[in-house]
Amino acid sequence: GDSVTQMEGPVTLSEEAFLTINCTYTATGYPSLFWYVQYPGEGLQLLLKATKADDKGSNKGFEATYRKETTSFHLEKGSVQVSDSAVYFCALTGANSKLTFGKGITLSVRP
Amino acid sequence: DAGVIQSPRHEVTEMGQEVTLRCKPISGHDYLFWYRQTMMRGLELLIYFNNNVPIDDSGMPEDRFSAKMPNASFSTLKIQPSEPRDSAVYFCASSFRGAANYGYTFGSGTRLTVV
């Protein structure tokens, strides 16, 4: 079945550092790919998405490119801020309309 | 739109009591999902509905859990009787025509503590 694998966490960075969070997936067909963010005490919010190969999703300085050849959707940001501290989830959806989530990774950004 | 609305935000109950969690999806959304989040197991899909009809309840842990969607604007998740291991944050999410193009919109969750 469909699955999403995220790198192990947590991740701690200093403000203005470069961020990469790895995500790879296994799916049949052509899934849509998503990154969600969860701030403390809140629900998940859609951060960005890509619906076909080579699409780049972007939002709030974050980017991720749908790489079908490597089945990856790595999240990047050039300069993180303290306010980016949160849990980040990679997810995919296939033909059944369900979102399959990775385990999530906690990012902490130090001032 | 006010987004997906869940109530209550926090619930503390004693073991053996019935608990009912409530969700109002975004108007016009035709899919509704119930998730449970714990530190140990992460996010688990419990059940989802399409046009008020339950499509997949394979994630419901056991018969103590039940979910209903009597109309397009309301759903409940009930636990009877509740047990301490049910303590978790329960999220409701809704989407339009499934997740492929739009993803889900999540509510703020209900933090359930069973003592």
Image (tube, coloured by chain):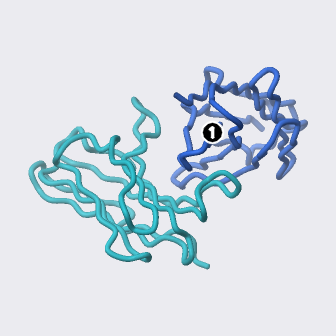
Chain colours: A blue, B cyan
Which residue is at 42% across, 59% downward? B49
Number of marks drawn = 1
Circle 1: residue type: Ala
Outermost residue toward the left? B16
Camera-nearest residue between A74 and A42: A74
Camera-nearest residue between B21 and B72: B72
Q: Which residue is mark 1?
A: A91
Q: Position of residue B61 (x, y in %)?
A: 26, 40
Q: Which quadrant is the N terminus of chain B positioned in?
A: bottom right
Q: Quadrant of residue A103?
A: top right
Which residue is at 88% across, 36% downward? A54
Q: Position of residue B104 (x, y in %)?
A: 59, 56
B52 relative to A111 in the view: left or right = left
Residue A78 versus residue B63 in the image, above or below: above
Camera-nearest residue between B83 and A66: A66
Element carrying mark 1 = strand
B28 relative to A13 in the view: left or right = left
B2 relative to B69 in the view: left or right = right
Which residue is at 61% across, 39% downward? A87
Q: Position of residue A50 (x, y in %)?
A: 78, 45
Mark 1, Cα crowd under 10 Å, few <14 / some 14-19 / many 20+, is many
Q: Position of residue A6 (x, y in %)?
A: 64, 25
Q: Chain of mark 1?
A: A
B67 relative to A13 in the view: left or right = left
Which residue is at 42% across, 54% downward? B48
Camera-nearest residue between A43 and A39: A43
